[in-house]
Amino acid sequence: MGRSRNRTVSPYEPRRRARRRALQALYQWQLNDDSAASIIKQFLEEQNFDDVDAEYFQGLVRDVIAEGPALDRKLGPHVERIDSSLDQMERVILRIGAVELLKHPEIPYRVVIDEAVELAHRFGAEQGHLFVNGVLDRLARELRPVEFQAESGG
């Protein structure tokens, strides 16, 4: 029997796919330094956006490109090497996580970290997911102390 076309898709899957597309677009941007509008246009035209939250994708790409240096300053105290020696894929993943922690309080910090770790596990260096987890955990403690207190019962 063939696969059912009415398969149940997690309500979180469109955003997960948006993050994946944003990661690819932002990695390309780091290599080519195109404008956000140009990268977004290219991806929307060339990639399959079925079951992808295209609006969320566009927001992530725009925010990371517009705020890259500010994101690096936020991440800096939590990263031993935010300079050019940092793996390019890990840099993009950290920036996406930082944008989500800063601009999307509706997303629990644990979800932000889990999604970033998954991206790093899938696309980063061999132990990159451990690095990403540690950096974003420290950043989340700084940016979302109320969530940490509530979680620990404090």
Image (cartoon, grey):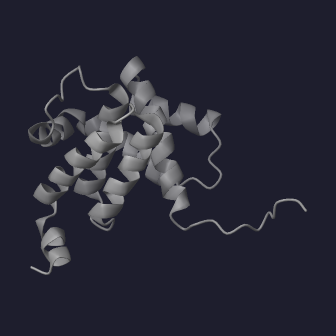
Residue 37 visible in rendering: yes
What residue is at 22 percent from the left and 47 percent from the top? 134
Kindly identify the residue that appears in the image at 33 percent across and 57 percent down.
112
Residue with the most extreme right position = 1
The C terminus appears in which quarter of the rendering? bottom left
- If the image is split into quadrants, where does the N terminus sit? bottom right
Query: In this rendering, would 62 be left or right of 21?
Result: left
Decide: is 102 above or below 21: below
Residue at 33% in and 36% down: 128
Residue 129 in the image: x percent, y percent?
A: 35, 42
The percent position of residue 4, horizontal first and vertical second, equals 81, 64
Which residue is more in the foreground, 104 or 128?
Answer: 128
In the picture provided, is 137 more to the left or to the right than 60? left
Residue closer to the observer: 134 or 66? 134
Q: Residue furthest bottom?
A: 153
Q: Choose top left, top right, bottom left or bottom right for residue 121.
A: top left
Q: Position of residue 103 (x, y in %)?
A: 26, 56
Vertical placement of 59 versus 42: above or below?
below
In the displayed structure, 11 sits above or below 41; it is below
Residue 33 in view: no
- Kindly indicate the quadrant of the structure image that contains residue 32: top left
Question: Is residue 21 shown left or right of residue 149?
Answer: right
* Spot occupied by residue 141 in the image (x, y as percentages of width and height): 14, 59
Q: Quarter-wise, where is residue 114 in the image?
A: bottom left
Residue at 16%, 77% (x, y): give it.
150
